[in-house]
Amino acid sequence: MREVTTQGPVGDRVKYKTYPIDFIQAVDKNGNPITIPNSPSIEIRFTDNSNKKTVFYFDLIRFDGENITGRQSRFMSNFKKTIPISSVKKIDVQNGKKSFKYGKS
């Protein structure tokens, strides 16, 4: 884990630990491999077997082998959700184009 500081659009800063992932290897909707640079605006959407969608910030998720725990807000750190990986049928990664960036501590 590495500690990062995220700066929001109005200058607010949040420190947290995240996995040291600089690039995300994925497949686009046409089946072509792509590389996405990691940033605090990357979102990951899990669709479960009932077509219910859960969206987390990519750098705020944890996977323990059975469950995915993530945060849907950078500002409310207690707002966490856990979903079992066995219920996931689709995973989408996208740049949410929000004005978050990694900053200096």
Image (spheres, rainbow, N blue to C red):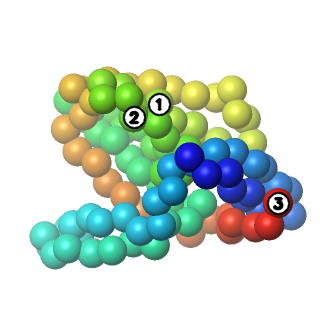
Earlier sequence position, callout 2 versus callout 1: 2
Instruction: Answer above or below: position of 61 versus 11.
Output: above
Q: Which mark is residue 105?
A: 3
Q: Amino acid at mark 1?
A: Thr
- The quarter holding residue 10 reads bottom right
Look at 38% across and 29% down and name the residue there: 64
- Give yes or no for contact between labels 3 and 1 (Cβ–Cβ under 8 Å): no
Q: Which mark is residue 63?
A: 2
Please provide percent x and percent y for residue 50: 23, 28
Category of crowding for the residue at label 3, using alpha-carbon neighbours closer than 10 angstroms: few (below 14), some (14–19), many (at least 20): few
Please provide percent x and percent y for residue 33: 20, 73
Category of crowding for the residue at label 2, using alpha-carbon neighbours closer than 10 angstroms: few (below 14), some (14–19), many (at least 20): few
The secondary element bearing badge 3 is classed as loop
Give left or right: position of 55 versus 89: right
Look at 75% across and 48% down and name the residue there: 15
Q: Which residue is mark 1?
A: 69
Q: How many marks?
A: 3
Residue 9 visible in rendering: no
- Give yes or no for contact between labels 2 and 1 (Cβ–Cβ under 8 Å): yes
Q: Amino acid at mark 3?
A: Ser
Give the alpha-carbon distance from disc 3 to disc 1, as whole Å: 25 Å
Give left or right: position of 74 versus 58: right
| Dot in front, 2 or 1 | 2
Look at 78% across and 50% down and name the residue there: 14
Give the alpha-carbon distance from disc 2 to disc 1, as whole Å: 7 Å
Q: Amino acid at mark 2?
A: Phe
